[in-house]
Image (spheres, rainbow, N blue to C red):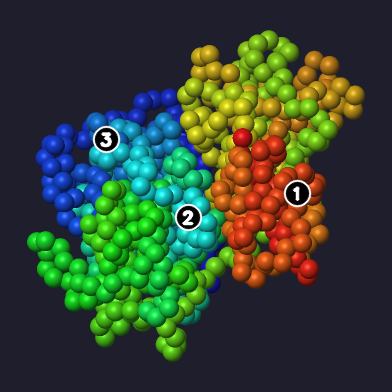
Amino acid sequence: MFFEQLHGQTGSGGIPMRMQRKIKSDTALIDMPPFDSLKVINENDSIINKRNKGFRISYNYKVNISPANAGSWYELDNHTNVWSATIRSKKAYAIGLVFNNFVLKPNEKIFVYTKDEILGAFTKDNNMPTSVLAVIPLNGEEITIEFSSPYNKSEQGSFYIETVAHVYQNLLQDPGLCNIDINCPEGANWQTIKRAVCKLIIYKDGFSELCSGVLMNNTALDAKPFILTAQHCLFDNSDAARTVFYFNYESPFCNGPIGNQMQTLSGSQVRSTIYDYDFTLLECYQHPPMGFKPYMAGWSLETANNLDTVTCIHHPWGGNKKIAISNAQPIVDTYTELGSPPYATNAFWRIAYWNHGVTEKGSSGGPLFDRNYHVIGTLTGGDAECGNPINDYFERLIVSYQSKANPAEQLKYWLNPKNLSITSLDGYNPFPFIYSGCDTLTNIASSETKKVLPYEYGKGYYSGQNSDSITKYAEKFSTSDSLYLSGVLLNINSIGSSGGLIIRVYEGGEIPDTTIYENYIPYGSLTGNTINYVEFYPKVTVKNNFFIGYEISYQANDTFNLYQAAPRYINGWNSAYLYANNSWVAFDKYTVSGWGSSFDIQPLTCNTITSIAQTVKSNYELQVFPCPASKLVNINIPFNLRSIKSVQVYTLTGSNVSADCQVKNTTIEINVSNLIPGFYIARISTDSESYTAKFIKAR
């Protein structure tokens, strides 16, 4: 059973009241006391000298901040009560929070945000069995908490902030070049398995620690969210409840920028742990939703012919997901840690040398895979680092599997609940059709010209900032089917210097009406003069008429604007709207001579069928890298797909496009240099069937 309705840790979307300017007064400011950062760093250095590979990142203040003893209140016209407080910790790279006694009622919301990032809305769906909610650190020295409730103060839900984490490590700095991004060529064969690997932030008493972990499959094939990590990272339910799990935190392409940090879950419980073998098995309180593309990794107890090459996928220094590969058989060995009690004898794999990549601090708990993509252990520690890729130690799954009779000290009880006579289990994809049936919608014909149109009633643009200070714009779409919107493409010409966009999806008839989704996108995460993809989370379902709109923030000298269809003077057909004089108006009713237009806004819709006739082999997910690509796209060829007759490239509307395709030994290479940015489908045909792979052409 899967629970798609459960929200990710980023919440259910929306915009805080203060960011909507519905509250004019300042929020109360709470300053954290200074601490001896040099002393803390020196203490951390002594820990860093140890061989285990956890990574301390913050100094944690123990606090008790709640609406009852701090912050400021404001009542809106609709009788909604709003409480807010801003917490400042000077010289912090980022600030993280842990809530306790977190029990919200229906229609209550909590946002956690900075000027550039928003988490939330957290609602009753985020109430945990422990009443604890940990949230990821947001960048900067200040963080604001906003709570809104339709109830009187005596009837409201409850919460207080128990921990303020002053992050003194720069988590936005990617590890050195000795670490290899998972989306580099070395990771080409791991594009499915990588989805099982996650990053952990564990908020502890006094500090926070970064580690890695892996989603594990079990013989019930029920997608229980088991995560295997290292025992020295965490081992009790108090820490497990205060752990945040990051999924798909990776650069979108080789040696690229930092990844998306917003696919996270909060809270778990310990199912099994033991010091001797340095493993902890957690079960998350929530299932990773479909939008996270989760994968439950397989595992193996075999040691015969599957260990000539082993691979670790991990998050060194809490950065993007990386890969390390050793081309030699691991050695059975004993791990020792100076000043710590001894671990079990011969309970570890020793990797004598990494041929590609390396592990570092933050890699603890990262899974070790055999050549068959099965987990055979998790990282404890060792001597490996950049410039010295030797002697790393991983707990041996074959030992941990039945380490003790007690289910709380072994893995078999949890990973093999059916007690099958097996020595290995393949991985499991709980959402096997996640990539099928997706397409983009557009109201601009391929024959039309896209332009930035000057505002006819003064200065500025029809699709952005202008002398009449119009802030809201929307594009109309129609469908007879129920569609799932996974995101939207915006063809942006110019972005602003500060502030950002509020992206909204509306239901409506002839004009935008009810807002069913909204999210804030800072200008800093957008790029001018190119197509930008904005992902929707949680999912948005639409039917009949719907609108996708954006609201801009005005700053002096900014010139935000979007490309749109050139004026349609002849037929006047229109799907673009703007909000002027306190109402939505269609372009053909607003422009000087009644011309119509469409904004270059393209929603990405799923559960539709593309116009390409094909028989899709659904048992294989073709692995594509890099994605997005600017010059070359590589597609791995499965072992049973070598008799290829043709390779063709299509747009998502089914139009065939010209692209140089070469079939090499184990890959198909497509030159996409001449393609315009957007989504494409590669169709690979054999004698009997066709396979498809979707890729994105970047600018």
Picture layout, residue 68 above or below residue 434: above
Q: Which residue is mark 2?
A: 186
Q: Amino acid at mark 2?
A: Glu
Disc 2 versus disc 1: nearer the observer: 2
In the image, taking residue 651 as reference, residue 76 lies left or right, namely left
Vertical placement of residue 569 versus 237, above or below: above
Q: Residues within 10 Å of mark 3 (few under 14, many from 20)?
A: some
Q: Of callouts 2 and 3, which one flags the residue occurring earlier in the amino acid sequence? A: 3
Compared to residue 456, the image places residue 389 above or below, namely: below
Distance of mark 1 from mark 3, alpha carbons?
48 Å
Q: Which marked residue is nearer to the observer: mark 2 or mark 3? A: 2
In the drawing, what numbered circle is on residue 650? Answer: 1
Which residue appears farthest toward the front when viewing the image?
665
The residue under label 1 is which amino acid type? Answer: Tyr
Give the total of numbered labels: 3
Counting from the top left corner in percent of width and height, residue 170 is at: 31, 39
Q: Is residue 592 visible?
A: yes
Tell me which numbered mark, 2 or 1, is placed earlier along the sequence. 2
Please name whichever residue, 488 or 542, is drawn nearer the observer in this view of the structure: 488
Going by the image, does 224 lie left or right of 516? left
Residue type pointed to by label 3: Ala
Choose the circle earlier in sequence order: 1 or 3: 3
The kind of secondary structure element at disc 2 is helix
Which image quadrant is residue 31 in?
Answer: top left
Q: Position of residue 536 (x, y in %)?
A: 57, 46
Question: Residue at the location (70% across, 39% down)?
Answer: 675
The reply to whether residue 121 is visible in this rendering is no
Residue at image location 49% in from the left, 50% down from the top? 184
The numbered dot on residue 92 is 3
Outermost top residue:
458
